[in-house]
Image (cartoon, rainbow, N blue to C red):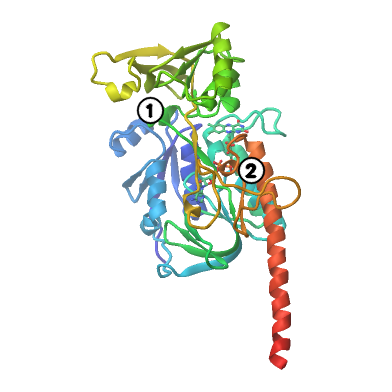
């Protein structure tokens, strides 16, 4: 029997990415040791030393080799190298089909997991592919206060883990991996993962979400969920009485800034240009709030760094300003002014990118921003795309509401629509089988 390599994970408390790392190894049935560095200075120093000076958790080691944080670990998993290091790589030939499934669901966000619960209960034994963000966007937030049924609120990771447990109880199988392509020229569909695994499936539910765009600036990773958020509707109420900064200049930024005036002392909007991109309706709403003293606008201004800690939240940000606009493109210009600005919360409202690359070439129709088009309307089949057998649910379809509960609702509809489609398919197959022997007798 081959011996499993030693896996060690340094973690800390309230760390969604630590949970994701542990879930990844759990899903592979790989045992690991965890070291919680919260409140343990010696252990923290040990982690920093072993991790080449990095001060973020998680840090993963396999047989003493530094793998890195969650991003590094999941990137290795994507290519299949992680399984090789763990000695669990499968030995199927490249391109060989591993397994046929009735239903494959892309994504383990709220939409995908709800679809998995319903599909499991309909005996469709779904295979649910986790994608590069297992558990979806909700794992990035520590408090979900508006999901029905939890009057005290619930943490995003806990809600997702409960749903995963519920889905697996009903026969869903969760698999780490990212879908690279779906071939709809053949039936069953051929579904290829980035790690080379190939499945076939009679039906596919696309519940792959939309990723909120971020800026990639220092402080962002550490403070996401700790005073930095990409969802004002979700997190605004947690920062009551604070000064808040909204970054962006489109409809979403205007809407979020207006919404945040309910809670904030003052809402500041930082926009990199002189003109807002938002519709007049929203600009007018914001201007009313400016007149009432609730919003202040900082045009030609961009954030270049966030400061604070996970314990204390956001403390202040570093901004740059230049009258010509786009100040980060003019950092060497003597006219560009750099200054620190105190705020208690920051909201990025710079748009979402729907995760639909893997559906290109399938004939599934998308709008100009890449959101999936589904039939919608009344009656059954609302989640059907233009390709029979491919269904869409959650934020990957819904560019407007983008809430956990709306994603759950669409996930359930997609599973019910897929079940009807699979039953029709089964009926059609069995009627062909009935006709064929008769034809042979002639
Ligand atoms: C910081 C933050 C806080 C929030 N707080 C709240 C809140 O309090 N209340 C609320 O109602 N909403 C909240 N939201 C919004 C909520 O999280 C989303 O509306 C909801 O998660 C959408 O669910 P989804 O399943 O459609 O998509 P997602 O949650 O985005 O999940 C998408 C899934 O698809 C997977 N995926 C992507 N590409 C692929 C691929 N190629 N192959 C396989 N899988 C793939 C991803 O890995 C992920 O598992 C918050 C969002 C954020 C960012």
Q: CA distance from mark 2 to mark 1?
A: 33 Å
Question: What residue is rendered at 58% in x and 6% in y?
Answer: 292
Q: Residues within 10 Å of mark 2 (few under 14, many from 20)?
A: few
Residue corresponding to mark 2? 162
Left or right: 259 in relation to 344? right
x, y percent for residue 59? 38, 40
How many numbered marks, from 0 up? 2
- Relative to 321, is 291 on the left or the right? right
| Up/down of 28 relative to 33, above or below | below
Q: Which residue is mark 1?
A: 41
Check disc 2 and report its element: helix, strand or loop.
helix
Residue at (42% x, 42% y) in the render: 70
Residue closest to the far right: 379
Report the residue that reaches farthest toward the bottom: 442
- Determine if the C-beta at disc 1 is less than 8 A from ligand 1: no
Q: Quadrant of residue 300?
A: top left
Instruction: Say left or right for 243 vs 305.
Output: right
Residue 258: x and y in percent read: 58, 18
Marks 2 and 1, the one that precedes in the sequence: 1
Tag 2 and tag 1, C-beta contact below 8 Å:
no
Vertical placement of residue 338 versus 126, above or below: above
Where is the C terminus found, in terms of image quarters? bottom right
Any part of residue 314 in sight: yes
Q: Quadrant of the N terminus?
A: bottom left
Q: Secondary structure at mark 1?
A: helix
Above or below, 301 relative to 1: above
The image quadrant that residue 432 belongs to is bottom right
Q: Where ligand 1 lies, by image quadrant?
A: top right
Residue 273 badge: none
């Amino acid at each position: 029997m081959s011996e499993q390599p030693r896996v060690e994970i340094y973690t800390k408390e309230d760390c969604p990415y630590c949970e994701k790392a542990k879930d990844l190894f759990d899903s592979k049935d790989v045992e690991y040791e965890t070291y919680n560095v919260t409140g343990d200075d010696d252990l923290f120093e040990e982690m920093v030393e072993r991790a080449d000076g990095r001060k973020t958790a998680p840090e993963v080691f396999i047989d003493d080799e530094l793998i890195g944080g969650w991003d590094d670990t999941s990137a290795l998993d994507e290519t299949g190298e992680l399984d090789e290091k763990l000695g669990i790589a499968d030995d199927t030939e490249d391109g060989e089909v591993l397994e046929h499934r009735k239903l494959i669901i892309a994504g383990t966000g709220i939409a995908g997991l709800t679809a998995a619960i319903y599909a499991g209960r309909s005996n469709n034994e779904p295979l649910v592919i986790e994608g590069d963000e297992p558990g979806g966007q909700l794992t990035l937030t520590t408090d979900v206060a508006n999901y029905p049924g939890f009057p005290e609120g619930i943490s995003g990771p806990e809600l997702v883990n409960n749903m995963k447990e519920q889905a697996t109880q009903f026969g869903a199988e969760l698999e780490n991996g990212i879908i690279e392509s779906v071939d709809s020229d053949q039936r069953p569909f051929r579904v290829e993962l980035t790690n080379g695994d190939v499945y076939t499936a009679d039906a596919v539910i696309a519940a792959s979400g939309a990723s909120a765009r971020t800026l990639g600036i220092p402080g962002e990773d550490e403070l996401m969920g700790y005073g930095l958020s990409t969802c004002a509707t979700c997190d605004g109420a947690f920062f009551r009485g604070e000064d808040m900064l909204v970054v962006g200049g489109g409809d979403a930024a205007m809407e979020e800034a207006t919404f945040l005036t309910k809670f904030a002392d003052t809402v500041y909007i930082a926009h990199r240009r002189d003109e807002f991109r938002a519709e007049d309706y929203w600009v007018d709403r914001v201007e009313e709030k400016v007149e009432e003293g609730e919003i202040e606008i900082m045009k030609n201004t961009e954030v270049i760094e966030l400061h604070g800690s996970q314990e204390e939240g956001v403390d202040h940000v570093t901004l740059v300003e230049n009258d010509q606009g786009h100040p980060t493109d003019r950092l060497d210009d003597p006219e560009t002014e750099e200054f620190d600005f105190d705020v208690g919360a920051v909201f990025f409202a710079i748009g979402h990118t729907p995760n639909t690359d893997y559906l290109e070439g399938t004939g599934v129709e998308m709008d100009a921003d890449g959101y999936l088009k589904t039939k919608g309307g009344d009656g059954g089949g609302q989640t059907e795309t233009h390709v029979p057998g491919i269904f869409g649910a959650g934020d990957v379809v819904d560019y407007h509401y983008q809430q956990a509960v709306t994603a759950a609702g669409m996930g359930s509809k997609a599973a019910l629509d897929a079940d009807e489609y699979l039953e029709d398919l089964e009926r059609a197959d069995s009627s062909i089988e009935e006709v064929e022997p008769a034809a042979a007798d002639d």
